[in-house]
Image (spheres, grey):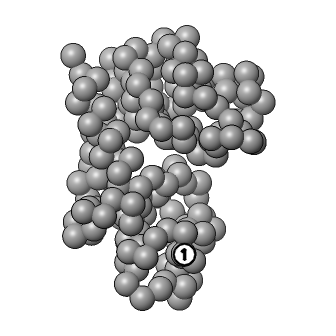
Amino acid sequence: MMQYIALLRGINVGGKNKLPMRDLRDMLGSLGCKKVQTYIQSGNAVFQSADNAKVLSAKIRNAIEKRFGFAPIVLLLSVDKFKAIANANPYPHAVDEPTSLHVWFLLETPSNPDLETLAGVKAKGEEFALLGDAFYLHAPDGIGRCKLAEKVDRCLGVATTARNWRSITKLLALTVENIS
């Protein structure tokens, strides 16, 4: 069995696209996933499955659409891939402020990213880097004030889902707890 980390995009705590994590855990279990754990209400899960990522991602998306009426982006990463992205963090000085460091996980590597536009809206003190299929942003004044953050998807030209460093480290910790 392969251990995966699922990152769902567009899941909200309340209102539109609400998906309680208890329902997500149950749904993943009904799809044959084992040792399912979720983290916070924004669509994060760690589990084991015998299915390959592409097949399982489609199954999860279809099951959510059938039950809840919306089909979120479901990005499945092997634990090794997720760790590699975390280990490639070009801003190790920012890990002590985990809500100021964000990673956008990309469904594919951008073929023609517009990094010039992103550089043009970057505020003083902000740093960003595109490394393959991950985009890293250190926004020391907070993501809510960061104009660059709202342009990432459009400028990269691929579907993404972002997590702050706190979520990344918690998901990594769940992978350790999940192995046995």
Say which quadrant the N terminus sits in: top left
Quadrant of residue 65 in the image? top right
Judge whether 165 appears above or below 139 on screen: above
Taking the view exactly as shown, the residue that stands out farthest to the right is 69
Judge whether 9 appears above or below 173 on screen: below
Label 1: state its secondary structure: helix
Relative side of 178 to 140, left or right: left
Residue 146, horizontal then vertical, whole percent: 52, 75
Q: Which residue is mark 1?
A: 145
Q: Residue at x 59, y 64 (%)?
A: 153
Residue 78, horizontal then vertical, whole percent: 35, 35
Say which quadrant the C terminus sits in: top left
Judge whether 168 appears above or below 65 on screen: below
Task: Depth check: give the residue in front, 79 or 110.
Answer: 79
Q: Residue at x 68, y 36 (%)?
A: 18
Task: Depth check: give the residue in front, 29 or 55.
Answer: 29
Q: Residue at x 55, y 11 (%)?
A: 30
Judge whether 156 appears above or below 133 on screen: below
Task: Depth check: give the residue in front, 10 or 113.
Answer: 10
Quadrant of residue 130 in the image? bottom left
| Residue 119 appearing in the image | no
Residue 3, horizontal then vertical, whole percent: 34, 26
Total marks in image: 1
Label 1 neighbour load within 10 Å: few <14, some 14-19, many 20+: few
Quadrant of residue 20 in the image? top right
Q: Residue at x 35, y 55 (%)?
A: 165
Task: Depth check: give the residue in front, 27 or 51.
Answer: 27
| Residue 163 appearing in the image | yes
Amino acid under label 1?
Answer: Arg
